[in-house]
Image (cartoon, rainbow, N blue to C red):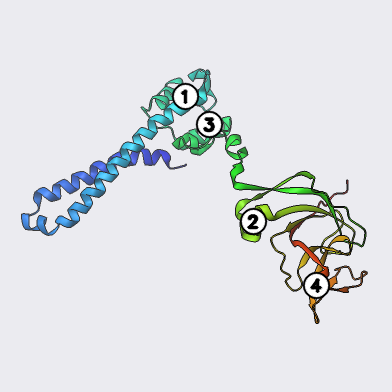
Amino acid sequence: MKHVNAIYRALPLWRASFLEFFGYYLITSRYRDFCSWQPCITLCTTYIFRVVQDISSFEKMLMTLGERLKKIRNDVSQKDFGAKFGATPNTIRRYETGANPPDADFLLSVCNEYSINPTWLLTGEGQMHKGEAQNIIDESSFDLIPMIKAELSAGGGAFVYSEDIKGYYAFRKDWVRRVASGPKDMVMMRVIGDSMHPTIQANDTVMVDTGRKAIREGEIYAIRFDQTIMIKRLSFRPGGKIQIISDNLAYQAYEADIQDIHIIGQVIFFSRVLIQE
């Protein structure tokens, strides 16, 4: 923003100098030179036309900048408003009418004083205030994953399953699609017991992808086995057996027939509250 004022002033001068030089060349050059340079001249003419359009848009933006300054000032007098930034009422009036472009330091001071979004002040895009721009969350960018009123046993206790939803966790759509089968296949559950310590601990919340039921060697799954729902690490064994493993070495691993294990889904994420309630 430090060079905004210089850019404002330099563009008209640059435009005039360039056109004057180019016109002089066309007048003084011989006709055959003009013909040989015609492709280049056509390109330059197109470029100049675009530059003039850009400058016109720039001048239009300058006017709207003044209008936005007036909106920020609101009901405050030009005298009182200018006093905040060491500017006279006449200076403020010229800024607002577009007679003079405001310098970068002035614009920065206005943004800081009134918590104005600089992008909005310069271009009119986005929210007027910084807080509005920062606090708006596009809900369409998130998937809501249900927190099931259920507890997965990471020990050996019995489990009563309930599909009551306690709430929702919001995850970015791009993240869910990158790591999971899909938002409709996801559920969140709370863990009890310490058999998966230190990987997953009691009271951790896990995300279970119910679309991933195929067993992958050494991965963690939510399973139903022997009337108990639990989270365990699974490993293949000969003869159609699956080894059910606890990360906590205090719990012994055991084997079961693969047909006796119901795979609820793969655990792909967990969260942990570090403070004690």
Q: Residue at horizontal 10%, vertical 57%?
A: 35
For marks 4 and 2, the one nearer the N-term is: 2
Q: Quick check: 92 above or below 105?
A: above
Q: Which mark is residue 249?
A: none
Q: Is residue 176 left or right of residue 252?
A: left
Q: Nearer the viewer, residue 6 or 77?
A: 77
Q: Which mark is residue 182?
A: 2
Query: Residue tagged by mark 1?
Result: 70
For marks 1 and 4, the one nearer the N-term is: 1
Residue type at numbered disc 3: Val
Q: Position of residue 155 (x, y in %)?
A: 90, 62
For marks 2 and 3, the one nearer the N-term is: 3
Residue type at numbered disc 2: Gly
Q: Residue at horizontal 39%, vertical 33%?
A: 62
Q: Quadrant of residue 207?
A: bottom right
Query: Residue tagged by mark 4?
Result: 258
Q: Quick check: 43 above or below 225?
A: above
Residue type at numbered disc 1: Lys
